[in-house]
Image (cartoon, grey):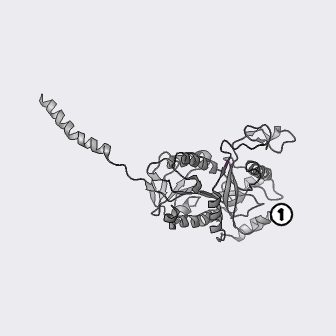
C-alpha cells in the first residue's frame, strides 16, 4: 500500500464515526404550541409604528422570539407561554400558503394547539355596529362561483353570481363540495362568545356620529358589542347595499337557511382550507379553530350616499372604526388566548 493510500484510509477511519454520529443524532424536539394567533394585515413594522392587525398582539402578548419561515409570507413570532403569531398577508392565496408553510414546519407541534384567526372586517349594519366583535359560526366562500356581468344578467335574476355546478342563482340544492362553507366547532364558538360577551369595547363620539348616518338600522346605532354570526370571505373587497343583499342570501343558501351573514373578511377561507388539509394530515385539530372579526366599517353606503362615493371614502383604510376594531380584536381575542394558556393542562 502506498503512503497516499494509507493516509486516505486513516482519514476515512477518522471521518466515518463523525458522519455516523451526525446521521444518528436525534432531531430537536418540536416546540409544543398552545395557541396560534393568525393576523392578516400589518400597516408597517411588527412593532412601534401605526398598527395593523398583528402589532397589538406582538406587543401585548410579548411575541418576542422571531423564527424565520422562508416559505411563508412573514416570519412567525413566539412567546414564553407557547403562543405563536402568524402574519399571512392579504387575500386567500397568501393566507392558505402561509398557514400551510407554518403548519407543516417540523419545528412546531400543533397537535393540541388552538387557532385564533383575528382581524378587522366590514359589517352588516342590520346586525352589528362599528367596533363590534363577531365570533364566526360559519365562514362562507364568496369567490367560488360562476359570474355573469351585471349588464348581461337576465331581468329575473337577482344577481350575476351563480353557484358552481348550477345554472341559475341560488338553485337548489346547495352543494358545498369545494370549500364553499366551513362550519366551526359550535361548542367552542359558544364558549368563546359567553366568555367575552361582556367585554367593554372602545367607543368614541366620532363613532357615535358615524353610526347616526345609518338611520333605520337599530343594531348599527348601538355602542360596540360582542356577538356571534356568520362571515363571508372573499378576496374581492366588495361594497354596497346590493352586494350586501347578495352576501346575506349567499350565506343563507350555503347554510340551508340557518346562517346570518354579519361580517365580510378576505382571507379566512384560505386559512381554513389550509387548516382542513393540515387536519387531514394529523398536524392540527380543526375542532380547536376560532374566527373573530371586528367591525372597522360598514359593508354598504349610508342612506342618501351612492355606493361609489361610499367606497371612495374607504380607500387607504380610512375606516370609521379602524383603531377601535383593532383594539377590539386584540382585547376580545386575548381573553380567549389567556384562558387557553392558563388552563392548558386541563384542556389537553
Q: Position of residue 236 (x, y in %)?
A: 69, 47
Please determine whether, in this image, residue 144 is positioned above or below residue 242: above
Could you tell whether 174 is left or right of 135 in the image?
A: right
Please determine whether, in this image, residue 159 is positioned above or below residue 194: above
Quadrant holding the N terminus: top left
Could you tell whether 44 is left or right of 303 in the image?
A: left
Q: Find the magenta span and give its range.
A: 176-181
Q: Position of residue 64 (x, y in %)?
A: 46, 61
Queried whether the magenta region covers residue 179, the answer comes back as: yes
Instruction: Check disc 1 and report its element: helix, strand or loop.
Output: loop
Magenta stretch prevailing secondary structure? loop
Q: Is residue 48 visible?
A: no
Quadrant for residue 16, please give it.
top left
152, 248: nearer the viewer? 248
Q: Residue at x 65, y 44 (%)?
A: 179
Queried whether the magenta region covers residue 61, the answer comes back as: no
Q: Residue furthest top?
A: 1
Q: Residue furthest right?
A: 155
177, 115: nearer the viewer? 177
Numbered disc total:
1
Quadrant for residue 115, please give it.
bottom right
Q: Position of residue 58 (x, y in %)?
A: 52, 61
Q: Residue at x 45, y 63 (%)?
A: 80
Q: Is residue 51 visible?
A: yes
Q: Which residue is mark 1?
A: 216
Q: Position of residue 174 (x, y in %)?
A: 74, 44
Dot 1: few (<14), some (14–19), or many (≥20) neighbours within 10 Å?
few
Amino acid at each position: 500500500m502506498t503512503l497516499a493510500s494509507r493516509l486516505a484510509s486513516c482519514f476515512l477511519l477518522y471521518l466515518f464515526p463523525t458522519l455516523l454520529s451526525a446521521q444518528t443524532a436525534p432531531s430537536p424536539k418540536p416546540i409544543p404550541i398552545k395557541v396560534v394567533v393568525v393576523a392578516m394585515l400589518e400597516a408597517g413594522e411588527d412593532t412601534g409604528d401605526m398598527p395593523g392587525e398583528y402589532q397589538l398582539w406582538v406587543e401585548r402578548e410579548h411575541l418576542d422570539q422571531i423564527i424565520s419561515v422562508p416559505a411563508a409570507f412573514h416570519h412567525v413570532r413566539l412567546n414564553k407561554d407557547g403562543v405563536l403569531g402568524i402574519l399571512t398577508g392579504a387575500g386567500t392565496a397568501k393566507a392558505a400558503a402561509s398557514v400551510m408553510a407554518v403548519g407543516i414546519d417540523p419545528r412546531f407541534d400543533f397537535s393540541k394547539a388552538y387557532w385564533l384567526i383575528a382581524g378587522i372586517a366590514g359589517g352588516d349594519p342590520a346586525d352589528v355596529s362599528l367596533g363590534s366583535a363577531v365570533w364566526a359560526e360559519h365562514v362562507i366562500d364568496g369567490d367560488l362561483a360562476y359570474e355573469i356581468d351585471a349588464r348581461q344578467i337576465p331581468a329575473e335574476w337577482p344577481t350575476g353570481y351563480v353557484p358552481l355546478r348550477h345554472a341559475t342563482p341560488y338553485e337548489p340544492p346547495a352543494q358545498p363540495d369545494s370549500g364553499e362553507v366551513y362550519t366551526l366547532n359550535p361548542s367552542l364558538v359558544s364558549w368563546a362568545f359567553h366568555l367575552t360577551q361582556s367585554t367593554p369595547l372602545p367607543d368614541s363620539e366620532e363613532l357615535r356620529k358615524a353610526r347616526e348616518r345609518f338611520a333605520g338600522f337599530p343594531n348599527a346605532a348601538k355602542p360596540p358589542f360582542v356577538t356571534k354570526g356568520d362571515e363571508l370571505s372573499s378576496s374581492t373587497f366588495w361594497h354596497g347595499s346590493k352586494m350586501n343583499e347578495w352576501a346575506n342570501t349567499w350565506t343563507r343558501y350555503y347554510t340551508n337557511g340557518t346562517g346570518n351573514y354579519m361580517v365580510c373578511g378576505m382571507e379566512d377561507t384560505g386559512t381554513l382550507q389550509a387548516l382542513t388539509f393540515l387536519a387531514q394530515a394529523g398536524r392540527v385539530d380543526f375542532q380547536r379553530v376560532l374566527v373573530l372579526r371586528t367591525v372597522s366599517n360598514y359593508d354598504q353606503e349610508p342612506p342618501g350616499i351612492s355606493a361609489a362615493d361610499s367606497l371612495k371614502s374607504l380607500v387607504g383604510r380610512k375606516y370609521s372604526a379602524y383603531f377601535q376594531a383593532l383594539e377590539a380584536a386584540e382585547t376580545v381575542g386575548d381573553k380567549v388566548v389567556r384562558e387557553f394558556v392558563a388552563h392548558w393542562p386541563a384542556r389537553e
